[in-house]
Image: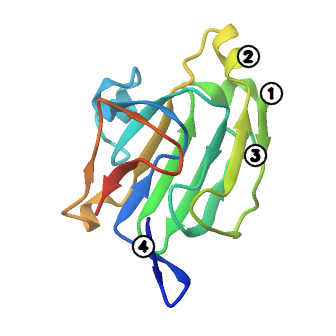
Amino acid sequence: MLFYKKNNKVEEKENELKAYISGKVISITEVADSVFASKVLGDGIAILPDGNTVFAPCGGTISMLADTGHAVGITADNGAEILIHIGLDTVSLNGEGFKIMTKQEKRVKLGDPLIKFDKGFIEKKGLASDCILVVTNADAFPKLEFQSGIMADQGETVIGTF
């Protein structure tokens, strides 16, 4: 989301996604999981995280929240269906190492904390900690583009445009 002031009010521009965590942004095709890499679930990117908390990449409503804390869905204000998945095969951890910081149907804005995770614990279990973002209805957004091969600062770097 792009913020600008108009009459001392902050407004959002609905055609951007900002980094949901700081780290190195890679193409979804580089993710070591064939379901994500082949874009079966939709187009997206992954961030190799420097931090341990995933934040909302835009304004919207929490549409899905995995009981295990490894994934969250957001229906963005522009209608995009966004899935953020923390790690690969992390559902096998049955919630261990994850702390959910939001609620189903909650209205969120850019930068709201969603899920905290223990990156060291995940990696100690031999799992990747890649934080993947997929727009599951990407076909509805023909101008959707993602930026990869960059270092992203959470809440500041634009990682996708519609």
The crowd level at tag 4 (other Cα within 10 Å; few <14, some 14-19, many 20+) is few
Colouring scheme applied when the structure was drawn: rainbow
User: Do tag 2 and tag 1 residues touch (Cβ < 8 Å)?
Assistant: yes
Distance from label 2 to label 1 (Cα)? 9 Å
Amino acid found under the numbered disc labelled 4? Gly
- Outermost residue on the left side: it is 142
Query: Disc number at residue 121?
Result: 2
User: Do tag 3 and tag 1 residues touch (Cβ < 8 Å)?
Assistant: no
**What residue is shown with label 4?**
79
Answer with the quarter of the image where residue 122 lies: top right
Judge depth for marks 2 and 1 and give the one in front.
2
Amino acid found under the numbered disc labelled 2? Phe
Q: Between disc 2 and disc 1, whose residue precedes?
A: 1
Distance from label 3 to label 2 (Cα)? 18 Å
Dot 4: element: loop
**What residue is shown with label 3?**
67
Dot 3: element: loop
Amino acid found under the numbered disc labelled 3? Asp
Residue closest to the eye, 116 or 151: 151
